[in-house]
Image: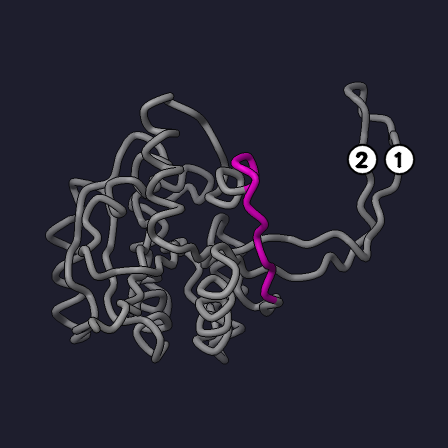
């Protein structure tokens, strides 16, 4: 009997322009301590023993530059670099269309989350294999208020149930591919991949991550990243 496939592929989504950064180049290619942000991201996922292959989705103007980064740092788990779409959802779907037939688990990760812990990624992959869908998140530290349309507090959310969701978000391939295909055909807008799973009735298991898994969005985040790297 043929052994079931257990291949895991990570899709790094690095196709944003990063307008809030105020930089001449996309934030994923800004150099921090001599290395582009995306190089740290690729390195973190490459160190995860449960990831077999990495596909990078990036801007068309940066395909060659991204390949140069992969070659320069010897990231041998990167198999393909493909062009992104007009939206994050389109970009993820472009990556999903590149998956091999023997892939059964997909980890979707932001290219601008360079500080992800490889052990956390492994745990998220394990939970997705068990439950179908999983995502890294951290418990909210602050009290969360829900406001009305006029900016007044409506009610206070139960902080014990509040989580800030990060990436990677990990799924069985058949589930996430079908969800993205449907969303693409219907031209749906959504902020992360978990929303697609939730709306289709799937339960998403949260894996507790680290607050250090920051998303590089503004210039202040660069300073935080340098601090986390020990500068």
Residue pictured at 44% horizontal, 59% vertical: 113
Left or right: 60 as drawn, with respect to 120: left
Residue pictured at 21% horizontal, 53% vertical: 99
**Residue of label 2:** 146
Residue pictured at 82% horizontal, 40% vertical: 145
Q: Position of residue 56 (x, y in %)?
A: 24, 54
Which residues, given as a range, are shown in magenta?
Answer: 198-207
Q: Are marks 2 and 1 in contact (CB under 8 Å)?
A: yes
In the figure, 91 relative to 6: above or below? above
Q: Position of residue 130 (x, y in %)?
A: 50, 65
Circle 2 Cα neighbour tier, 10 Å, few/some/many (<14 / 14–19 / ≥20): few
- Find numbered disc 1 in the image and state the secondary structure of the residue it sits on: strand
Q: Position of residue 220 (x, y in %)?
A: 54, 55
Left or right: 178 as drawn, with respect to 142: left
In the figure, 15 relative to 124: above or below? above
Residue pictured at 41% horizontal, 37% vertical: 19
């Amino acid at each position: 009997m043929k052994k079931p496939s257990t291949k895991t592929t990570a899709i790094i989504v690095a196709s944003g322009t990063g307008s809030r950064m105020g930089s001449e180049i996309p934030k994923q290619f800004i150099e921090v301590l001599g290395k582009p942000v995306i190089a740290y991201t690729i390195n973190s996922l490459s160190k995860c023993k449960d990831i077999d292959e990495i596909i990078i989705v990036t801007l068309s103007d940066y395909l060659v530059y991204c390949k140069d980064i992969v070659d320069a740092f010897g990231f041998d788990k990167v198999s393909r670099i493909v062009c992104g779409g007009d939206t994050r959802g389109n970009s993820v779907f472009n990556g999903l269309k590149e998956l091999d037939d023997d892939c059964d688990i997909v980890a979707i990760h932001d290219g601008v989350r360079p500080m992800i812990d490889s052990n956390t990624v492994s745990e998220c992959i394990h939970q997705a294999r068990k439950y179908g869908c999983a995502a890294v998140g951290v418990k909210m530290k602050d009290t969360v208020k829900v406001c009305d349309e006029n900016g007044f507090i409506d009610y206070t959310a139960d902080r014990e149930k509040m989580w800030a969701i990060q990436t990677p978000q990990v799924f069985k391939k058949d589930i996430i591919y079908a969800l993205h295909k449907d969303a693409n055909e219907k031209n749906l807008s959504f902020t992360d991949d978990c929303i697609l799973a939730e709306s289709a009735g799937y339960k998403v298991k949260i894996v507790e991550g680290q607050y250090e898994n920051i998303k590089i969005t503004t210039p202040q985040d660069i300073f935080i990243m340098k601090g986390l790297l020990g500068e």
